Image: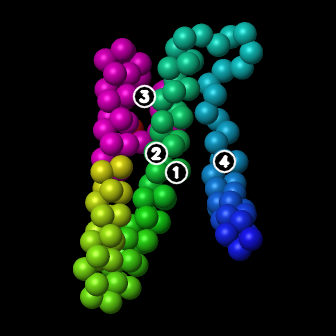
Amino acid sequence: MKFLLKIKCSCLAAILLFLPIVASAQGLVPCSGADCGFDHLVILVNRVIDYLLVNIAIPLAAIMFAVGGFKIMMAGGESGKISEGKKVIIDVLYGLLIAFLAWVIVHTLLDVAGLDSSYSFLELE
């Protein structure tokens, strides 16, 4: 029974944590109704990838870095717990590397396709 309560509390906390992020997703769809074409689909995919990377992957990676660091600090000299914390940090680094490589690949393909920087949701350019 306590396990079920922990799961419910964790789900509620996750919902409350990510609700503002979901609400900030407006502006992703570049068109409305019948005027949508294939180019709008490409723009939408790019905006979703930008949004997921900036608003979800980076904050989640920061949280997981903190978890890994906390595990290392609280290990108390136990090598198993220290290696577990290091594994979390290394896995986060791999995840961020994969996410950023996906972003680079998508932006490179869009640049090769001839789209200008107006498709970007981030407007970093």
> In the image, is residue 104 above or below residue 90?
above
Q: Say which residue label 1 marks.
A: 56
Marks 1 and 2, how far apart at CA? 6 Å
Assess disc 2: are there few (<14), some (14-19) or many (≥20) residues with their C-alpha within 10 Å of its C-alpha: some
> In the image, is residue 18 above or below residue 33?
below
Residue at image position (63%, 52%) is 21
Assess disc 1: are there few (<14), some (14-19) or many (≥20) residues with their C-alpha within 10 Å of its C-alpha: some
Marks 2 and 4, how far apart at CA? 13 Å
Q: Quadrant of the N terminus?
A: bottom right
Marks 2 and 3, how far apart at CA? 18 Å
* Badge number at residue 22: 4
Q: Which of marks 4 and 3 is in front?
A: 4
Residue 67 position in % (x across, y down) = 43, 71
* Badge number at residue 117: 3
Q: Say which residue label 2 marks.
A: 53
Front-lying residue, 59 or 124: 59
For the view shown, which residue lies furthest in the bottom direction? 76
- Secondary element at tag 3: helix
